[in-house]
Image: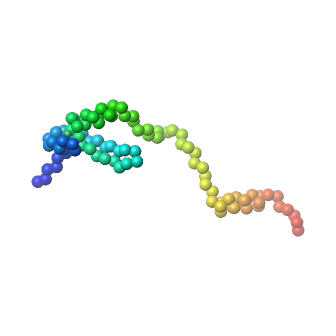
Amino acid sequence: MKLTLDVCNVCKVPGLPVARYLVRREGGALKKLDLCATDAAPLEDLLTHAEDEARPRSGAPRPRKRKVMTLEEIDALKRKADRSAPAKNDE
Ligand SMILES: [Zn+2]
């Protein structure tokens, strides 16, 4: 039988209820911390000053995508324009 136990990352006291925190410094890796109430207190205190991360709202207007044309597409448009232009009767 195998028993796994979540213990606080700081005090490692077995049997204490822990809460999981995922912390990430901007640009850094996501870190996992299991903390008992005592060791989580400083973090919980910090969290009272935290702001919710801004998420893009669904339904918000999206910036319009600029269509990128290849040179071939531009040439094709030019050719089409030339053909639709009144033909010269040089003959
Ligand atoms: Zn602890």
Q: Position of residue 42 (x, y in %)?
A: 27, 34
Q: Position of residue 13 (x, y in %)?
A: 15, 42
Please indicate whether residue 51 sits to the left or right of residue 15 in the image. Answer: right
Looking at the image, which residue is at 41% across and 38% down? Answer: 53
> Quarter of the image holding residue 19?
top left
Looking at the image, which residue is at 25% across and 37% down? Answer: 40
Location of the C terminus (image quadrant) = bottom right
Furthest residue in direction left, as rendered: 1
Q: Position of residue 39 (x, y in %)?
A: 23, 37
Furthest residue in direction bottom, as rendered: 91
* Ligand 1 visible in quadrant: top left
Location of the N terminus (image quadrant) = bottom left
> Quarter of the image holding residue 47?
top left
Q: For this rendering, which residue is in front, 64 or 83? A: 64
Q: For this rendering, which residue is in front, 18 or 80? A: 18
Looking at the image, which residue is at 39% across and 34% down? Answer: 51
Q: How many marks?
A: 0
- Colouring scheme applied when the structure was drawn: rainbow
Q: For this rendering, which residue is in front, 10 or 22? A: 10
Please indicate whether residue 54 sits to the left or right of residue 39 in the image. Answer: right
Please indicate whether residue 25 sits to the left or right of residue 62 in the image. Answer: left
Looking at the image, which residue is at 29% across and 41% down? Answer: 21
